[in-house]
Image: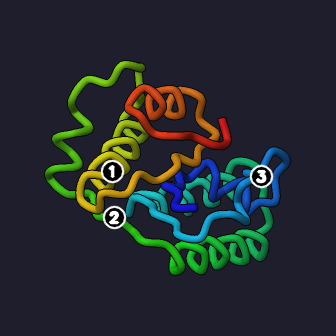
Amino acid sequence: MIAYVDSSVLLRVVLGQEGSLAEWPQIERGVVSALVQVECLRTLDRLRVAHGFPEGEVATRREAVVRLLESMEAVAVTAPVLRRAEQPFPVTLGTLDALHLATALLWTDLTGEAPVMATHVAALGAAARSMGLVTVGC
């Protein structure tokens, strides 16, 4: 399976949280926005500062994020991605989710392949489905 993976999916896997994506082992090719690394590493830092997550544990999880992302195709946040993200979607989305959906849609246009949208964010999943993408995780 080709999947566009957002940070909600990657973080649940890296943190070993309940509700991690059941389809994770089926992903043969992962596509992410270049934003995912920033999102994941900022979240880990927030866990350390706000919730006392041990520094050693944060370092281990940061390394896991970086290693997983090395195996995926990162799509840069380009002017076309930004222009698509600023356009209306049928479902209300925050900025980062709009950037993720815009990235997945433009990647589809460029490659001719439609990835499965892997997300635990209900609004992003609904928006992706409304744009013709298959979703998992939400």
* Residue holding disc 2: 75
Q: Please tell me which residue is depicted at 31% across the width and 43% down the height of the picture.
A: 102
Q: Quadrant of the C terminus?
A: top right
| Disc 3 residue type (three-letter) | Ala
Q: Please tell me which residue is depicted at 62% across the width and 52% down the height of the picture.
A: 46
How crowded pointer 1 is (Cα within 10 Å; few <14, some 14-19, many 20+) is rated as: many
User: Which tag is nearer the camera, tag 3 or tag 2?
Assistant: 3
Q: In the rendered structure, are the residues bearing label 2 and label 1 in contact, judged by CB atoms less than 8 Å apart?
A: yes
Q: CA distance from mark 3 to mark 2?
A: 24 Å
Q: Quick one: SS at disc 2?
A: strand
Q: Position of residue 86 (x, y in %)?
A: 22, 33
Residue placed furthest toward the right: 18
* Residue holding disc 3: 22
Q: Please tell me which residue is depicted at 53% across the width and 73% down the height of the picture.
A: 69
- Compare residues 29 and 86 and report the one nearer the observer: 29
* Residue holding disc 1: 103
Colouring method of the image: rainbow
When asked about the image quadrant of residue 1, the answer is: bottom right
When asked about the image quadrant of residue 71, the answer is: bottom right
